Amino acid sequence: MKKLKLHWQILIALVFSVLFGYFFSDHVGYVGWLGDLFLRALQMIIAPLILSSIISGVLNLGSSKNLGRMGAKTIGYYLVTGLIASLIGISAVNIIRPGVSANIVLDKDFVMEAEVSTLGQTLLEIVPTNVIQALAETDMLSIIFFAILFGFFASRLQPKYKEPVESFFNAVFEVMMRITMFVIRFAPLGIFGIVSGIVAEQADDLVGIFSSMGMYMLTVIFALLIHSFVILPLLLRYLGGISPPKHFKAMSVPLLTAFTTCSSSATLPLTMKAVQDNSGVSEKTSSFVLPLGATINMDGTALYECVSVLFIAQVVGMELTIVQQMIVVFTALLASIGAAGIPMAGLVVITIIMSVLGMPLEGIGLILAVERILDMFRTSVNIWSDTCGAVIIAKSEGETLKV
């Protein structure tokens, strides 16, 4: 009997997990550990994978000129797509105006407590005081900074010193990818445990959530779909000469995993494997572009933040001017980078934006009920954008791709 491909196994697990979580919500505790174990396994891989992949990638790039060119392309792509996503979100919420028709009462007692670094503080904290601590805490920006610095200076060593370093980190990266392949085999079971728990949590109040927040959710999802299936495919086609359907199919496993785990970082090992094996991107490109993307490229999150802030403003009867809406766009774009490693990062950034605009912070309580559901969609968009960037940059570097 022919074995089902992994993406079909994950889809089947997804369907059964929804049914199990809804109809047997009292028994979800018996399977929830599967999701916890799968997430822990993915998180175990992240720090050593990022460190080894970036050092290996920078060493393979060779000269500082190549590194500068690759870095400029990567950051340029992420900034442009993030800006486009934010503008789509602003446009969608202004056209649909979900907050005007929403029948919701503001919770005056709600308080959002969160500590967020300013952009300047975030840039300062990129430089780690203790590399081992940064690895232990999976501080993505600090790990990436140290890895780029280490790789750059290692590439300038004499051959007798450089070659052992390069061989070592290439070997570590290869080991981490093999561990990733092992963990991926258990993705259907992990996803079954994760999604069952999510559905069980929401099962009692699904009708109430959709009746009060339906238009807001549809606005966010509609805008995400426009960005994912119109803007990014156009960039794939016309900037990279790449077939969007083929690339989308090649990315099915990381996209489904991102949808269920709601974590770009946890999905990173699967994303790197899929981009290399299925789309044909070289190790040197994927190992540089994708870890950066998992940290700073938050298209879906920036879009979600823009829609959410304007939705709350509409509910409380506050009309934002064009200038204020542009402040929302650029704050969402920049703050997403600083908040990437914070739990409930989207809500934290929305709090920052609302504080800047002088909006009532209790408005955050309006969107809490659907935060996890929308997180699944926007994380998938973040990953999709990362992979599109990887193949576009690989094509611009003259690589021959499978898509």
Image (tube, rainbow, N blue to C red):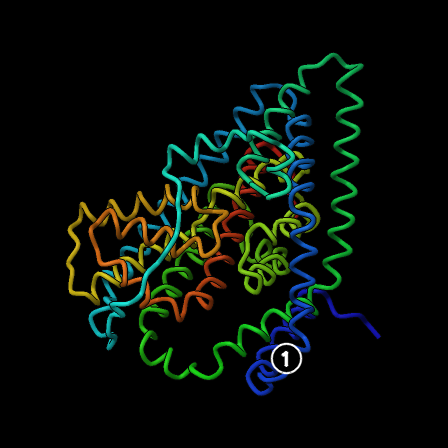
Name the spot of residue 397 as percent of width and height, x first.
58, 32
The residue that mark 1 highlights is 16
| Residue shown at the point (51%, 76%) measured from the top left | 201
**Along the viewing direction, whichever of 74 and 156 lies nearer the viewer:** 156
**Along the viewing direction, whichever of 385 and 261 lies nearer the viewer:** 261
Name the spot of residue 185 as percent of width and height, x first.
75, 61
Above or below for 301 versus 164: below
Above or below for 352 versus 37: above
Name the spot of residue 292 as percent of width and height, x first.
54, 39
| Residue shown at the point (66%, 68%) measured from the top left | 10
Determine whether, in the image, residue 222 is placed left or right of residue 162.
Answer: left
Numbered-mark total: 1
Determine whether, in the image, residue 67 is placed left or right of residue 334.
Answer: right
CA neighbours of label 1 inside 10 A, class few (<14), some (14 to 19), many (20+): some
| Residue shown at the point (58%, 19%) measured from the top left | 64
Residue furthest to the right in view is 1
> Is residue 75 visible from the viewing direction of this image?
yes
**Along the viewing direction, whichever of 358 and 228 lies nearer the viewer:** 358
Above or below for 400 versus 100: above
Task: Kindly identify the amino acid type of the residue bearing the numbered disc 1.
Answer: Phe
| Residue shown at the point (46%, 62%) measured from the top left | 375
Quarter in which the N terminus is drawn: bottom right
Element type at marker 1? helix
Name the spot of residue 277 as percent of width and height, x first.
71, 48
Query: Which quadrant would residue 157 be assigned to in this image?
Result: top right
